[in-house]
């Protein structure tokens, strides 16, 4: 197996006296679909903000996409992809403008942007609506585009933060098709979700409770360990309501 | 049973977007009624019309027997509304928010404390904290307390559990169950199919239209084809293989299994199993299952939209 894409050892973040992420140790390899679960307030968002180079850890070591989180945060940002339900594309820009904007942010030059835009519009079959404002496109198309734009600069890993929230059941599954395809091509996927059926689609899962790793394993192994049929039951057994902050 | 809410041919358009189209239904007093659908299905628009914040373009609606256009002032006093977007005052404390909403409705927290005790007691240790500093789950509990503090007769909850984890979602629905036992009429919208079974009746919404309206068990009866659950270790390869089959009617992942319907309606599970084994899936299992809410929703979506999805 290749070099791990994420490797953390006792990664910790404190705000004052409060330990939000407590000694998180993970090793995630290339092409893995890694699910990151936890109740609201369990420390998921803080962990992701550290892993994406947006927040400096308090202690512990970590490298993401080959860069150290303390000394190479800018390198991390350039070599990862990120997509969330809340922040992805601009509704007021056209499809082409969105692609151009995000490609520019990731530092692609004009020639590369042109080339990538053409490829993307073709492969997503969006040529006809290239100059249409995003707002008027169906949700399924927007999601496809958002995902493709997040990995336009060919990162080693993409972070998907609740990418399927509020989406209809068919679009949700189409989105997972894209995740599978990308992972087959070797892209590492780090995904959070509140849909427990989606947890089952991951290669491995980490369940956070009160800032700590409560379980880290393959979904089948977790279900076997708890003697239950579904990830929903595992989650409910593990993720007891956190101590109200 | 009297109607708490009546919706007759309601339509609403925003520019080129038909947000609601000919929605007609009624909700009985004391009913826990769910609107199930994704973003853009029209749930919020419908709620905003019912809580008198938006005028319908077509049709009419009544809440507690009062027309939403003519008697909006009377309706507002008698309903509770929890919008999908957090709408409390972030700079006020937990307690100040609650007192504010009570005073706006001319009542006090003490007078109706019994009703919100169950929910608010979990927040009391943090009553001096600013609402903007609360976690998602606690904001949701505070918003519900504020929507209940004047003891409304009908409660409108617009996606109260979106973005909320599975444990908090379960707790929230337990609270709704207890409110329902006290006789409150509750209209709730959600994108989560698993919450639909907790409602007395549900309406499936998709792109401004109602796809179906029935009890949860009645809804699943709309699913007509035999449904198979297929499991194999290599789920993704199995999914691709099944999709490539000329006989496949639908193939969808459902957690650790795939749900499959076939165009040959007489196909048996053992025949399907044999075919998959012949295709090289050695660790595969096939069983016939009862369709759930989500299976039915997907089937109805496909029926309405054909292959354009």
Image (cartoon, helix red, strand yellow):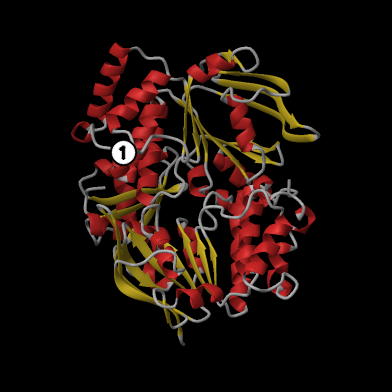
Q: Is residue B225 above or below residue B213?
A: above
Label 1 Cα crowd, 10 Å radius (few <14 / some 14-19 / many 20+): many
Q: Which residue is found at the position 45% from the left and 58% from the top?
A: B193
Badge 1 element: helix
Residue A196 drawn at (x, y percent): 53, 48
x and y, in percent, of residue A63 in the image: 61, 17
Report if residue A3 is visible in the image: no
Q: Which residue is mark 1?
A: A134
Q: Nearer the viewer, residue B60 or B144?
A: B60
Instruction: Residue lying at the far right in this picture: please name it.
Output: A17
Q: Numbered disc 1: what chain?
A: A
Where residue B46 sits: x, y (%)? 39, 64
Taking the image as shown, residue A158 lies to the left or right of residue B144, namely left
Percent across and percent down for residue A214 are 69, 40
Vertically, is A83 above or below A239? above
Left or right of A191 on screen, residue B170: right
Please state which of residues A159 and A96 is positioned toward the viewer in this rendering. A96
The answer, for residue B255, to whether it is visible in the render is: yes
Q: Is residue A66 above or below residue B107?
A: above
Q: Quadrant of the C terminus of chain A?
A: top right
Q: Residue furthest left?
A: A128
Front residue (pair B51, B163):
B51
- Residue at (62% x, 49% y) in the render: B136
């Amino acid at each position: 197996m290749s070099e791990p894409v994420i490797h953390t050892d006792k990664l910790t973040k404190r705000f004052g006296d409060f330990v939000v992420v407590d000694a998180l140790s993970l090793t995630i390899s290339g092409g893995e679909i890694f699910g990151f679960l936890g109740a609201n307030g369990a420390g998921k968002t803080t962990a992701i903000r550290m892993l994406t180079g947006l927040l400096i850890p308090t202690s512990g070591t970590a490298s993401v996409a080959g860069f150290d989180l303390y000394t190479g945060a800018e390198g991390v940002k350039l070599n990862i992809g990120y997509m969330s339900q809340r922040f992805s594309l601009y509704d007021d820009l056209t499809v082409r403008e969105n692609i151009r904007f995000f490609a520019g942010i990731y530092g692609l030059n004009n020639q590369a942007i042109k080339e990538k835009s053409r490829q993307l519009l073709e492969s997503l079959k969006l040529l006809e609506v290239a100059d249409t404002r995003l707002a008027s496109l169906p949700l399924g198309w927007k999601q496809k585009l958002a995902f493709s734009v997040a990995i336009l600069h060919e990162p080693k890993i993409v972070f998907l933060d609740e990418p399927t929230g509020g989406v209809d059941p068919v679009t949700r599954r189409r989105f997972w098709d894209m995740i599978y395809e990308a992972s087959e091509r070797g892209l590492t996927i780090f995904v959070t979700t509140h849909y427990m059926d989606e947890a089952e689609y991951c290669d491995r899962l980490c369940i956070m409770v009160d800032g700590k790793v409560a379980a880290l394993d393959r979904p089948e192994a977790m279900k076997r360990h708890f003697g239950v049929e579904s990830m929903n039951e595992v989650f409910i057994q593990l993720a007891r309501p956190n101590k109200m902050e | 049973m009297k109607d708490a809410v009546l919706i007759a041919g309601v339509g609403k358009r925003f520019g080129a977007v038909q947000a609601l189209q000919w929605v007609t239904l009624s909700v009985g007093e004391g009913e826990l009624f769910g609107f199930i659908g994704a973003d853009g299905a029209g749930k919020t628009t419908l709620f905003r019309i019912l809580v008198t914040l938006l005028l319908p373009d077509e049709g009419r609606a009544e809440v507690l027997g009062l027309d939403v256009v003519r008697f909006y002032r009377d309706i507002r006093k008698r309903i509770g509304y929890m919008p999908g977007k957090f709408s409390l005052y972030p700079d006020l404390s937990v307690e100040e928010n609650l007192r504010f909403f009570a005073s706006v409705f001319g009542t006090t927290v003490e007078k109706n404390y019994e009703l919100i005790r169950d929910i608010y007691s979990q927040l009391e240790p943090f009553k001096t904290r600013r609402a903007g500093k609360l976690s998602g789950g606690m904001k949701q509990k505070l918003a519900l307390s504020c929507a209940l503090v004047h003891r409304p007769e009908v409660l409108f909850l617009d996606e109260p559990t979106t973005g909320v984890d599975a444990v908090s979602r379960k707790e929230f629905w337990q609270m709704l169950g207890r409110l329902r036992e006290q006789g409150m009429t509750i209209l709730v919208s959600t994108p989560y199919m698993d919450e639909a079974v907790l409602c007395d009746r549900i309406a499936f919404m998709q792109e401004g239209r109602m796809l179906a309206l029935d009890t949860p068990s009645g809804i699943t009866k709309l699913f007509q084809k035999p449904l198979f659950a297929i499991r194999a270790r290599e789920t993704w390869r199995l999914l691709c293989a099944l999709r490539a089959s000329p006989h496949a009617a639908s193939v969808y992942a459902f957690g650790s299994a795939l749900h499959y319907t076939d165009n040959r309606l007489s196909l048996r599970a053992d025949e399907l199993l044999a075919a998959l084994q012949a295709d090289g899936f050695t660790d595969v299992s096939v069983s016939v299952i009862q369709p759930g809410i989500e299976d039915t929703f997907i089937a109805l979506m496909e029926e309405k939209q054909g292959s354009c999805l």
